Amino acid sequence: MPEQVQAVRAILTASPSPATADTIAKSFTRAPRARIAEILETLAALGTARKVEEGRFIGQ
């Protein structure tokens, strides 16, 4: 699981615009959208991502 979080954070940080769980999930072979959404919410709660609007996040 830590590898998944690191991978999502790296993709989010590299994204030139706010990203959604669907957008990030497309970067993985088998990543359920719900799991990516959960990771994004966790990153936001920890302060390493920021929710800029409903369902869209940017890296910090």
Image: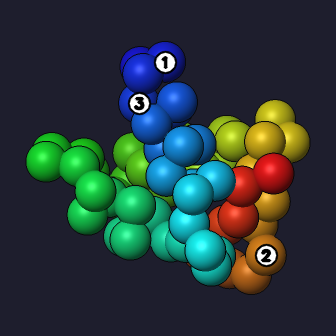
Q: Position of residue 58 (x, y in %)?
A: 70, 64
- The residue singled out by tag 1 in the image is 2
How many neighbours does mark 3 have within 10 angstroms: few (below 14), some (14-19), or many (20 or more)? some
Q: Nearer the viewer, residue 54 or 2?
A: 2
The chosen color scheme is rainbow
Q: Earlier in the sequence, mark 1 or mark 2?
A: 1
The amino acid marked with disc number 1 is: Pro
- The residue singled out by tag 2 in the image is 52
The amino acid marked with disc number 3 is: Gln
Mark 3 touches mark 2? (CB < 8 Å): no
Disc 2 element: strand
Residue 39 appears left or right of 34: right
- The residue singled out by tag 3 in the image is 4
Q: CA distance from mark 3 to mark 1?
A: 5 Å
Relative to 35, residue 58 above or below: below
Image quadrant holding the N terminus, namely top left
Mark 3 touches mark 1? (CB < 8 Å): yes
Quadrant in which residue 54 is drawn? bottom right
What residue is drawn where x is 39% and y is 45%?
Answer: 35
The amino acid marked with disc number 2 is: Val
